[in-house]
Image (spheres, rainbow, N blue to C red):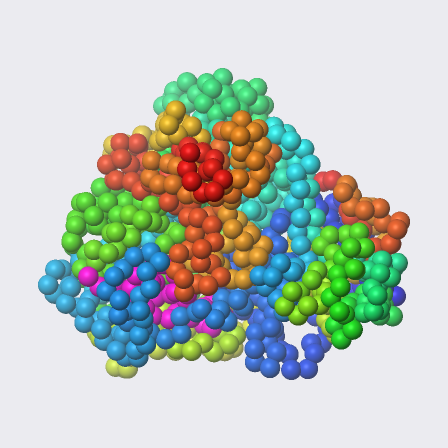
Amino acid sequence: MLTRRSMLRLAGAAGGSLLGSTRLAKAFEEVFQAAELPAGMRTVATACGICDSVCGVQAVLQDGVLRFLGGLPGDTNGGGGGLCAKGGAGIGLVYDPDRLKYPMKRTNPEKGIGVDPGWERITWTEALDTIAARFSNAISQYGAESLLVISRPSPDVWMRLLNALGVANRVDHLDECYLTSRILQRYCTGPMSWAHDFGNSKYVLLFGWDLLAKGKLVFARGIVEAKANGAKVVCFNPQYSATARFADEWYPIRPGSDLAVALAMIHVLLEENLYNQEFVANYTNFPEYEAAIRANFAPYTPEWAELQSDVPATAIRRLAREFGTMGPAIVPIHKKTLAANYTNASQLVHAILILNILAGTIDRPGGRYEARKISIPAVDAVYPRPAYPPKTGRRVDSKDRLPLVLEDGGGMFSTLADGMLTKYPGMIQAAFIMQYTMLGFPDPLRITEALKTVPFLAVYDFLPNDVAAMADIVLPGTTYLEVNDLLAREYSAKYPVVMSRRAVVPAMFEAKSIGYLAIELGKRLAPDYFKTPDGSWINPGVLLDEKTRRAGIANSFAEFPPSGLWERPEPFVPRTTFGTASGKCQIYVPQFVAKGYDPLPVWKEKRERPTAQYPYYFLTYIPAVQRRNTTENNPILTEMLPVNVANMNAALARGLGIREGDLVRLRSRTGSITLAAHLVETLRPDAVLVAHGYGQRSKLMRVAWGRGERDSDLIADQTVEEMVAAGNFAGSAGIMEAVVAIERVQDGGSEA
Amino acid sequence: MSYGWLFDPKLCIECRGCEAACKQWNGVQTLINVRWRQVYEKETVGYPTPALQVLSLSCNHCEKAWCAMACPVKAIKRRPDGIVYIDHDVCVGCQFCAKFCPYPPRPQFNAVKRKMEKCHMCYDRIDQGLQPACAANCPTGALKWGKWEDISSQGEGMVEGFTDPKHTRPHIRFITQGW
């Protein structure tokens, strides 16, 4: 029998080796699961909804009130029974006193950042009727192109509404996120994959990828596991980041030049034939295009790459050799950290996928793999519907000028203001924004001007942030702790794992779910799409029951295993065909040629280099305590990092006469912000680093208001013409492209 | 029988889950600069070969607790299992304890309640057979809690920058062995 004494002896014996942290964690769980909670307390298994890692959560209620969020016992593939600060502090979102409580309409006709909307409470019925009427009028008078919906493409019932209305202008932030990655994967390795088998990796090469600083537990735990199993970790990052701390070697690479190093590494692997011959011969199109491939990478020598990147040529050559010979190797990719920072991301992601392909670890132990999932039916499979009308009209984010982006369906925030102000002024007559703050847009001042041109704006959110405060009608949304849902694990699933998300507390005040919203608007705007075969309206609870039953999980959602985890352990069978056009991993992409793009990655410089006017690279990061839209106003998290600062190398600061705590103005061609300087040793001396997630200007968010500055004020948006000219064919927003001047603000606040 | 902390810095990913768990379970007041557990990140080597030391620390429930000895009103008490806690019915908020504690984050002054506060090892959880909230939520096992008789022989008693444990005998050990 496991006793605490014997478990701790395990910990001692483990000493330096990780113990299989999962093994030890499990040992602790087994003892403490037997413990009893104090009277009046009960637990509910659910799934965190702060980020997409979907770690399991054990919510503790005391007399019906949420008291604590702990990790979920048994969640070995997710949070490992733990939770990061964002997850642990999630209660603060539910009980936030500033939270939107009921639908409201604005009475102040003036709109702008920091402007009080003069909200007046209305009923849900009035809100929905008004929104439906405004949308209906816009569509009938100006066509479906006049509706702009800024939201993620989920849940399925929400998309049914948009598709039923023929909405072509659904825009989201994917150019700042994983649009580029998904497009390149589609052509190189198959459907979007998130999962990395770090535990079996022996060589982990990181271009940026600071997932530890972001607190993404699945990946962080994976890196820890890799290290415990003897993997070597190499990190290229201008910042010695939280992740760099785990690296055996760290190189302060010149911002935006990762592509050069990746190209040079491929050059070495090909020149010395250090790629996985068996995988490459059998599962890739290398044999078919070998001559063109070798010729493409021939100029990209390590010596050339050193001049672009500041990474020594000898190191590049040695690291490439290690990558090719030290066992399963992986170059992880995840969302923004690779695919959105620079305009050469299209080429960089392609090069990195090639590195992974040459390593022979696509859907193989130690490499990137497709999560194994069961089929959870979407609403279309449960309730058939009439055909959707065709999507016609102009694309306000210009995705039609980038065919691969149009095909993907992901949106672009970086081109939205140009679309609304310059290319198609006046086209958008009604807009709906779902769960985005102003911080999420490049050049927020410009997007504010763009949103002011829209005659009617409805916003659905949790908190009264800058975007919500621009709305004509604002709707209170439910948080993840107030809704039920089924979630298939994506980030770590060698066999199917489905989590249940349970409403731990009833919806607060009059908050409603997106499902409710979709169906209520559907009743008004597209009734034929929201009826079940027996003529009744689609009901979200019944739909969830149907999904649970048809997926083979349980007869109803209520009967989902109380542990919160449904698993179907099965052997991992590696793919022998891949979801690309040819069925093979494509190093050379012939489909790109047809569209006028390079079939292989070629060198592209980052868009903006330091100049005399703007001599420094402007870098941003997402701190572990912040996540899009859900954390800014949380007092527990705010305490951990109350304000953002201008992090700069101490030597750089000394050279500029800047001391710790001095106010400095950072100015790019787009805007300027003023922050306190913080001197560090962990950054290249030609860069300044600022945390994202600060600069909220809505006074209605009383914890977040006034703290720090928006990093995005320095970040330029783009025109699609600029993107095409830069060879940015897969839609990167280039959010770390900015270069800045740094000026010490004189004491007393007056500028020199 | 007493308890202690076992911290392995190389497993710490600085997610601050331990900090959030402590605040959430104990209802520690926010935005008044009182945090019973804190993750400290310190630069130990300069550019271009920087290094960071990371530590998650709270009260170490020292065997010879200088905070308790310093308290002029005997507000700081020890349970039979060694947990050192501040009795808020007695504390007058003089802040002497903080001046004597050798270990960050030290007892902290709650300016609203006008009392000193510090980690009490979640003794309400321990009494129910649970771990303290911080260790319970650590996703990598960097922060562990357990019986001192099992922990005390592991790792080292101090790390760089940590006051020599010989003075107060804090119940914390550090795994310093690398990967």
Classify residue A259 as left or right of residue A591. Answer: right
The quadrant of the image that shows the N terminus of chain A is bottom right
Q: Give residue A504's position: percent from left, percent from top.
A: 52, 74
Classify residue A35 as left or right of residue A603. Answer: right
Residue depicted at 29% across the width and 64% down the height: A471
Residue depicted at 59% across the width and 36% down the height: A680
Q: Is residue A700 magenta?
A: no
The part of the image, by quadrant, that contains residue A125 is bottom left
| Closer to us: B15 or A444 | A444
Residue stretch in magenta = A455-483
| Closer to us: A656 or A272 | A656
Placement of A632 over or under A714, stated as above or below: below
Residue A693 seen anywhere in this rendered image of the structure: no
Residue depicted at 16% across the width and 50% down the height: A425
Q: Give residue A158's position: percent from left, percent from top.
A: 31, 66
Placement of B71 over or under A63, stated as above or below: above
| Closer to us: B73 or A316 | B73
The quadrant of the image that shows the C terminus of chain A is top left
Q: How many marks?
A: 0
Considering every residue shown, the one lying at the far front of the view is A748
Classify residue A720 as left or right of residue A306. Answer: left
Residue A314 seen anywhere in this rendered image of the structure: yes
The part of the image, by quadrant, that contains residue A327 is top right
Classify residue B38 as left or right of residue A111. Answer: right
Placement of B132 over or under A293, stated as above or below: below
Q: Give residue A139's position: percent from left, percent from top.
A: 15, 63
Q: Is residue A458 magenta?
A: yes
The part of the image, by quadrant, that contains residue A107 is bottom left
Q: Give residue A225's position: percent from left, percent from top.
A: 64, 47
Residue depicted at 49% across the width and 74% down the height: A503
